[in-house]
Amino acid sequence: MNKVPNRQAICDVLLESARGDKNIVVLCSDSRGSASMTPFFEAYPERSIEVGIAEQNLISISAGMAKCGKKPFAFSPASFLSTRSYEQAKIDVAYSNTNVKLIGISGGISYGALGMSHHSAQDIAVMSALPNMRVYLPSDRFQTAKLISALLEDTKPAYVRVGRNAVEDIYGEADCPFTMDKATVLSDGGDAAIIACGEMVRPALEAADQLRQHGIYATVLDMYCVKPLDSEAVIKAAEAAKLVVTVEEHAPFGGLGSMVSQVVGANCPRKVINMALPDSPVITGTSKEVFSYYGLDAEGIAKTIMENLGWQAM
Amino acid sequence: MSKLKAKAFALRQDVLDMIKHSGSGHIGGDFSVMDILVELYFQQMNVSPENRDDPNRDLFVLSKGHAVESYYAVLAAKGFFPVEEVVENFSVFGSPFIGHPNNKLPGIEMNSGSLGHGLPVCIGMALACRMDNRSNRIYTVMGDGELAEGSVWEAFMAGGHYHLANLCAVIDRNGLQISGTTEEVMAQENLAERIRAFHWNVINVADGNDIAELDAAFEAAKTVQDRPTCIIAHTVKGYAGGEIMEGKAAWHHKVPTDTEYEQISAELRRRKEAAENE
Ligand SMILES: Cc1ncc(C[n+]2csc(CCOP(=O)(O)OP(=O)(O)O)c2C)c(N)n1
Ligand SMILES: [Mg+2]
């Protein structure tokens, strides 16, 4: 079982890239430990900015630094980064078009029992609603590394969400197909299309395995690029399937499910089931307990698909 | 007073049990703020399970919501819910006792957890209660790292502007936050002068873990008629947890090992007995 959380993969890429690029700067808001960025602060103290517990300041300072030629990566828990500093993201980053990479750590319900103040179940919706903001939820450490390397190559705003805990690998060190802003097809099948992002890719993949044993074949898309959504891949997968299922660690409105539904509705109408967190504070528990309670695990996904294809549930 | 002191040590044991049982919690900030909460709930505020819906009850918001374990221990001691229930269920699946204050529970007015909300909300409460000529008082406790949030200073400005004498804010000035000392992370020196400049009455409490000193400060605050009061309580993070824990940033949310649990319990017992014999 992999022990390296995605946040650490980000630190590794930045440590490596910062050797050759002195414009890379990292900003934290009393969050360097939870961001796994302590090694960067130690290696490059002069390129590390601590702003204290001030997420609004974090983003505006990053924007100012970007305007003056730096490549800021701003790290804070996704909950605070996306909602506390939303206007700073809107005006100083998206609208002013500054090269700020916003990294939301401990995303989704990573903080478990800490409650709704610490959950980011709205970040996809709010960040996607900003013109000029891209939104990424990588699924494992290898894809995270590829994504960060790609983001280092451009000068546009982006929001990246990663979870707190290490997640099982989807890909391999030498086997991580990645094209920027293109979904990765993990499995092919004509019965259902499962489109997932972030930590939900793993259960989606496992659900497809379970379904195969019942003779049901599903396409699985790793839609790490929620915005710009890979519409082409969505249409292709939907056209080949009887049913589309989206799975995300997010509120039921304005996230991956909403976006996929728009594309499918406009291009190749099919039944679309959006699997997401509820429209309420989530039940107290660890990520695993909460996911299983709301059916956001392999069993829940497989069951939903079987029922909607008219099969008896397992 | 020595009874309250002893109570504050005993309640820290409840906190320790919650954290040990669940494997989570913010013990450093819990232990630094406990004496402030005990003074507020057992000496200052007229709140109890009986008057929880009385519009004239005093109002409290725990702005540094991560110290919820201490808050639960104090509310349980006030009779809002049984402490065993909290220790048993804190942070477990399906539990109402989550890791930050939640007003679905009796005794809790406002939800918190995201820092920098308590003081602004209390400005609103103080304005509303004054409009209705209520005689109650409004209290909040903030962390010192929390003071980096701009919203806190917007609220200081409003509190001074509206002369909210019914409002008393407490700063748990333990000098530490997650990443180190407040002075390294985002310096807060000249704190009293800064807040005074916003037209607040500021009282420094040299030993913010001393209930008698806290009591004197809260009493003095009540006599000020034309402005809100801010009590800067100079506390020790991890207070009464003994040498292993006191004044150490690493204990912000560390969960004690079995040996550490025993050490801390022994220290709490020792201090409680000493307080009882005072
Ligand atoms: C808006 C916001 N940003 C970040 C956090 C994460 N966080 C929780 S506690 C804490 C440190 C608090 O330090 P301080 O205010 O000094 O509290 P204390 O020392 O009393 O524990 C941080 C950064 C948060 N809860 N809310
Ligand atoms: Mg502090």
Image: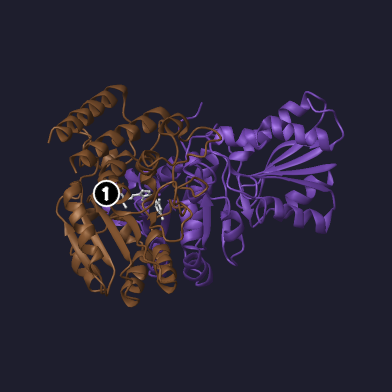
Question: Is the CB of mark 1 within 8 Å of ligand 1?
Answer: no
In the rendered image, which quarter contains the N terminus of chain B?
top left
Q: Which chain is purple?
A: A
Give the image quarter of residue A178. Answer: top right
Q: Residue at x 87, y 34 (%)?
A: A310
Above/below status of B60 relative to B68: below
Residue B49 image position (x, y, % from top left):
44, 46
Which residue reaches farthest left?
B278
Q: Is residue B243 visible?
A: no
Residue B184 image position (x, y, % from top left):
22, 54
Mark 1: secondary structure:
helix
Which residue reaches farthest right?
A310
Q: Residue at x 80, y 28 (%)?
A: A313
Q: Residue at x 22, y 59 (%)?
A: B219
Q: Label 1, on which residue? A: B39
- In this rendering, would B179 be left or right of A109? left
The colour assigned to chain B within the rendered structure: brown
Residue B26 image position (x, y, % from top left):
35, 40
Going by the numbered disc 1, the residue's amino acid type is Glu
